[in-house]
Each structure stands twice: as structure tokens, then as C-alpha cells.
Image (cartoon, helix red, strand yellow):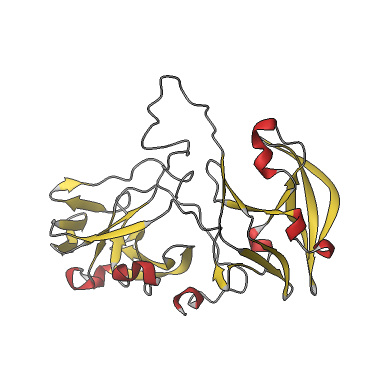
Amino acid sequence: MGLSWQQGPLAPRAVGRFLTPEPLPERLLFAEPLRRRMRVRLGGTWIADSEDVVLLHEPDRYPVAYFPIADVAPEALKRLPTVTSHHDLGETSWFEVRGGDRTAPRGAWQHVALPDHAVELTDRVAFAWRAMDAFYEEDERIVGHAADAYHRNDIRSTSRHLVVRVGDRVVADSHAPLVLYESGFAPRWYVPRADIDESALTAVEGQTFCPYKGLASYYDVAGAPRGAWCYREAWPEVARVSDLVSFEPDKVTVLLDDKVLTLEPGQKVTPHGVDRDLDPSEPTRG
């Protein structure tokens, strides 16, 4: 997703390339000012509050927010003897994080032997996202990971002909699908339920969470396990695909204008659990 995830520009499987005469390093890290006030909450108390956060984009990782130590409550951090080594950023020291009535072992870290080219991270700490109660930009909670300014979703109407088959059975036939273009992903096609043989769909247990779209529910499709998914109540930014169904081209046959679609390399997602104590409908409320 975004700058360094999936097939983004800094990801190992980037779909494009930088037009330079010399090959770039296999791993490129990118740090930039977030330019948003970010706060961290643990145990019912604010443990960090800063307008000087640096966001680190690292290949195959979600963006990570680094706070100046001066903007973290002094009593919140207890340095541990644990020291690990980061592939690019050297020795990493770990902290126990305390807030209110909660303690998070190894809840934060700091790179303490940075190379000269990474001075932007000097005297900064990052907090383990799921170990904290919540992260906020101003007074609104953000979920999943720090917001990636390079990640976006665009949805377009189309009259192209989309057909879904399982063997000889036609499961969907539509001239009015929606196509969702998401950073780092190949286009995903969403079909109105009126164009689907819903007797072919069997809801299955288990949902996944997307910080940009909400909770996805899954279906077996005419016996093909988890061959389709749906955001029953997609978040406002992508509300147009709410309750539409998208089909996995590696599990069922999906034809677009008679051309069989295939799952592009690098398109598998890393399952992401819902943030601690998050009501999934919270981001839909003002």
C-alpha cells in the first residue's frame, strides 16, 4: 500500500521503475515530516503529543511515526536492556511504555546508532501500534497505521462487461461494475448484487480489516473457498463500493470484456487485525 507497500515505488516488487542510469539500492527508506499533530494514548492518558513527527517509509512495512523524545511524557518510557539490530538503521534500543494503569513491554523503540544518512530519526522514538490504546491526529482517531499520504482509492463507473464463472456456472454477469484503483494494487472490480446469482455465495466466518476501507466479509463461491469479499458498510471515502462484491481471480474465473483476469504478483495482503478496543464503525462517525 502507498509508497513502500505492495507494488509502490519503494517496494521490492514495484510495478514501475525510477528512470536513472544506475540501478538503485535494493532497499530504499524514505523519511519525511508528517506535518500533522499526532498523539498517543495508553491507559487512558496521553503519553505523546507532537507536531514534529517524522514518518518512516520502509520496504514492505506500513508507515511508522517517530516522535521526538522531548514530546513524550518522561514517566512513560523505561529503557530496557534489550537491544536489537535493524537491517538499515543499526542498533535499536527498546522501552517499556507506561500509561495510566497499563504497561506495554517492548512498546517503543529508538535507533541509537544511526548512520549519518539517517539523522532525521535522531532522538526519536516509535510506538508499537497495537500495543497502544490509540493514535490520534488532532482529535480524530486513526486506525491501522500512520496515515500514508501516498495511498489513495479512486472509484470509477464503467460499462465494461464483467463475468464470473465457477466451472460452467455463471455466478455474476454485469455491464455496470465499479472499478477501485488502490495505490499499490491492480484494479479491483466490484459487482452490484443485482447482477450476481446470490445462491452461489455462502457467507463464511472471519473478517479482515483495511485501514482505508473498513471490515471485509468473505464468501465461498459455488464451492470455491473465500472466492469473494464485500465491505458491507465501507467507510465514507469508499462508500460507493458498500455491499458490492469483488471476486478473487485466482480462485474463480473472472472475465473482463472476455479477457481472463489473473492475480498479479505481490497482490496478497497481510491480514491486519482491528486496533485495540476499536469499534469498527468509529471512523464512520463524525
Residue drawn at point x = 56 percent, y = 70 percent = 141
Residue 142 location (% of width, % of height): 54, 66
Left or right position of 167 against 145: left
Q: Can residue 57 be seen?
A: no
Residue drawn at point x = 37 percent, y = 48 percent = 185
Decide: is 30 above or below 97.
Answer: above
| Res 122 → quadrant | top right
Compare residues 195 and 187 and report the one nearer the observer. Answer: 187
Decide: is 171 above or below 249.
Answer: below
| Count of number-bearing discs | 0
Compare residues 213 and 149 and report the one nearer the observer. Answer: 149
Residue 201 location (% of width, % of height): 30, 69
Decide: is 246 above or below 240.
Answer: above
Residue 253 location (% of width, % of height): 24, 52
Compare residues 19 and 196 and report the one nearer the observer. Answer: 19
Compare residues 27 and 121 and report the one nearer the observer. Answer: 121
